[in-house]
Amino acid sequence: VFLLLLPPLHPFLLISDSFVAMSAFTGYIVDDLNLPENSTVDMIAQEAERVCGMTLDQLKAQYPSSAKYVDSFCLGTVYIQTILEYGYGFGAPGSDATVTFKGTIDNTEVGWALGMLLNEIHYMSWEIQQSCSNDNSKVSKRYRDATIALAALASILLCTIVWLCYKANSRQSSNYSRELMAEG
């Protein structure tokens, strides 16, 4: 029943590619379970079966550095194996896609925020290329004109604020000078 509720999310992406898993995936697989960074779905499934067959005391003894998280090892490992296999299609027949579990790449920490940014930049450039390749020159020109108008308006507003602050400051300093002259 569970498998019927989980259709493949992106089967077209996983014909032949390399992917990097991060965040909780790396935490469970590499950091907590001490599996290698290039673990296969089968390796994760075997580990899930082993971990789910252990008692809580056995888990705490086996993984002392992760003792406060061992109560979720079974659920987390089964979830990761299920989402990789049935959600994303890793290990599917005809696919040689690989996944590597990484916390850092070239000394840069990877996480969901960086991944989301890269994903958005990738799709944004595709949308820009698409809009330029079609006959959307009117839309592109309107967008450019609106951007220039907003930039000009923001510049005028900034100059006005700076000028008002300067005037207010010069009034205060001239009032202060008058007070000093009146006292002297």
Image (cartoon, helix red, strand yellow):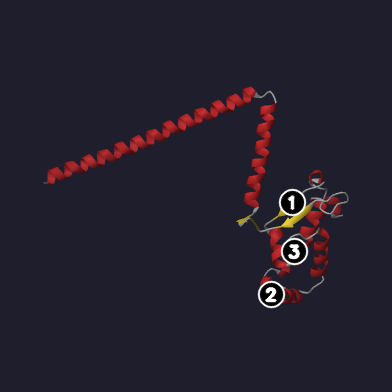
Q: Distance from label 2 to label 1 (Cα)? A: 30 Å
Helix, strand or loop at disc 1?
strand
**Residue found 73% across the figure and 66% down from its top:** 72
Residue hosting label 2: 64
Q: Looking at the rendering, which quadrant does residue 130 occupy?
A: top right
Helix, strand or loop at disc 2?
helix
Marks 1,3: beta carbons within 8 A = no
* Amino acid type, label 1: Phe
In x, y percent, where is residue 1?
A: 87, 54
Q: Looking at the rendering, which quadrant does residue 53 occupy?
A: bottom right
Q: Distance from label 2 to label 3 (Cα)? A: 19 Å
Marks 2,1: beta carbons within 8 A = no
Please say if 123 is above or below 97.
above
Q: Distance from label 1 to label 3 (Cα)? A: 15 Å
In x, y percent, where is residue 75?
A: 76, 63
* Neighbourhood count class around disc 2 (C-alpha, 10 Å): few under 14, some 14–19, many 20 upward: few
Q: Nearer the viewer, residue 102 or 160?
A: 102
Residue hosting label 1: 19
Q: Earlier in the sequence, mark 2 or mark 1?
A: 1
* Amino acid type, label 2: Pro
Please say if 80 is above or below 94.
below
Q: Is residue 117 left or right of residue 150?
A: right
Please say if 34 is above or below 149.
below
Closer to the eye: label 2 or 3: 3
**Residue found 71% across the figure and 64% down from its top:** 30
* Neighbourhood count class around disc 1 (C-alpha, 10 Å): few under 14, some 14–19, many 20 upward: few
